[in-house]
Image: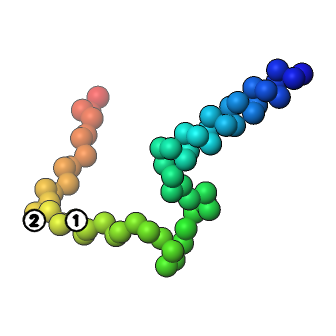
Amino acid sequence: MWKLALGFVAFAALALFVIFKAGGNIDMGGEKHGSEVSHEAEPAKAAPAAEAPAAAPATSPAK
């Protein structure tokens, strides 16, 4: 039983070390909506100049 507790403590310590060393500023608050969102809006994509007309559906030969 003591090995299980020791393994848990070691894994938790390693996980915290990696989180603080690698990321540092990790937000665990969940999804953000509204003014607290930190990402920028994507630029608008240009519409294609001319779209190809839709192809006619293929017909099967009459038997």
Q: Tell me which residue sits at (24%, 41%) in the image.
A: 58
**Residue 41 horizontal/vertical position (percent):** 34, 70
The residue lying furthest to the left in this view is 49
Q: Quadrant of residue 59?
A: top left
The residue lying furthest to the bottom in this view is 35
- Binning the other alpha carbons within 10 Å of mark 1 as few (below 14), some (14 to 19) or many (20 upward) gives few
Please give left or right for residue 15 compared with residue 63 in the image: right
| Quadrant (top left/top right/bottom left/bottom right) for the N terminus | top right
Q: Which mark is residue 5?
A: none
Label 2 sits on a secondary structure element that is loop
Q: Quadrant of residue 15?
A: top right
| Quadrant (top left/top right/bottom left/bottom right) for the C terminus | top left
**Residue 48 horizontal/vertical position (percent):** 14, 62
- Binning the other alpha carbons within 10 Å of mark 2 as few (below 14), some (14 to 19) or many (20 upward) gives few
Q: Tell me which residue sits at (22%, 65%) in the image.
A: 45
Q: Quadrant of residue 61?
A: top left
Q: Mark 1: which amino acid?
A: Lys
Depth check, front residue: 31 or 29: 29
**Residue 33 horizontal/vertical position (percent):** 54, 72
Depth check, front residue: 39 or 47: 39
Label 1 sits on a secondary structure element that is loop
Residue 43 higher or lower than 18, as above or below: below
Q: Mark 2: which amino acid?
A: Ala
Q: Which mark is residue 45?
A: 1
- Alpha carbon distance from label 1 to label 2: 12 Å
Q: What residue did someone put label 2 on? A: 49
Please give left or right for residue 28 compared with residue 36 in the image: right
Residue 61 higher or lower than 55, as above or below: above
